[in-house]
Amino acid sequence: MIGCDCAVCRSSDPRDRRTRPSILIEVAADQASSFARAVTHVLVDTSTDLRAQALAHDVRRVDAILFTHSHADHIMGLDEVRRYNAVQRTPIACFADEQTLDDVRRMFHYIFTPPPGPGGGLPQLTLFRIAGPFLLGGVEFVPVPILHGHRPILGFRVGQFAYLTDCSAIPDASWPLLHGVRTLVIDALRERRHPTHFTVAEAIEASARIGAERTYFTHICHDLPHAATCARLPAGVELAYDGLVLNV
Ligand SMILES: [Zn+2]
Ligand SMILES: [Zn+2]
Ligand SMILES: [Zn+2]
């Protein structure tokens, strides 16, 4: 937090240094169809910190981008993906719901209605509206509608893994989509109630109802020190941290 001197903001534990929420899903070759690329790299959200994250974690490819929603912390790094266009020499497929696509077109107007004349690299993107499950690298991605305050946004399920960031409620119709999830990443902002994010207690409750074996909290604010919070969470529940790698 800018200008904050709290124990978490001044912590020397690298797990307390949190940049914006985003994950990279690597679909391995043995799960992919024979004609697909060996590993398909699917980025979920283009956070404000995308460039620093890609450098810190050596992200060399982005084959597709999924958007959960269009809040600034989840999309403002979109311009940075032009580096992947340059390396890969192909447009990047982007998947989002209708409202997010509208917001992306408006907020990044210059990408979709480029000014005439030379100069200035622009991302090359192909936008797709999510209307149900879709395949990437031969693997099914299932959109999971969740509520972020009053706003309907998307979580994603891949196999027995689910990613539900920016979540304050799971609608009745979405619980069946989460049946059988064993590894869950879910929003848990802090202990105090918040209008658009789960608290720690609410996230624990949702995780238990889903029946996940392993749960990782994300979108954590500076109220929660990593080590001390993990020590008091139930078995199988812990805080995620920047650079965390999960095999699912
Ligand atoms: Zn702080
Ligand atoms: Zn949000
Ligand atoms: Zn957010």
Image (tube, grey):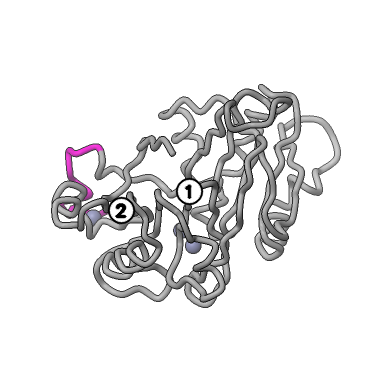
Magenta stretch, overall SS? loop
Q: Is residue 152 left or right of residue 165?
A: right
Q: Is residue 4 magenta?
A: yes
Q: Is residue 3 left or right of residue 36?
A: left
Disc 2 Cβ-to-ligand 1 distance below 8 Å: yes
Q: Residue at x 14, y 51 (%)?
A: 231
The 10 Å Cα crowd at callout 2, few under 14, some 14 to 19, many 20 or more, is: few
Instruction: Measuring from the top left, give residue 210's x and y in whole percent.
Output: 40, 63
Is residue 200 depicted above or below 86 in this figure? below
Q: Is residue 180 left or right of residue 60?
A: left
The 10 Å Cα crowd at callout 1, few under 14, some 14 to 19, many 20 or more, is: some
Residue type for callout 2: Met
Residue with the mark numbered 2: 1
Residue with the mark numbered 1: 160
Q: Nearer the viewer, residue 133 or 221?
A: 133
Mark nearer the viewer, 1 or 2: 1
Q: Residue at x 19, y 39 (%)?
A: 13
| Outermost residue to the right | 116
Query: Quadrant where the C terminus lies?
Result: top left
Instruction: Measuring from the top left, give residue 55's x and y in whole percent.
Output: 46, 28
Q: Secondary structure at mark 2?
A: loop
Marker disc for residue 128 = none
Residues shaded magenta: 1-14
Q: Residue at x 37, y 53 (%)?
A: 218
Q: Secondary structure at mark 1?
A: loop
Instruction: Measuring from the top left, give residue 196's x and y in whole percent.
Output: 43, 71
Q: Nearer the viewer, residue 218 or 134?
A: 134
Residue type for callout 1: Gln
Instruction: Measuring from the top left, give residue 160's x and y in whole percent.
Output: 48, 48
Is residue 70 depicted above or below 126 in this figure? below
Indicate which disc, 1 or 2, sits on the residue closer to the N terminus: 2
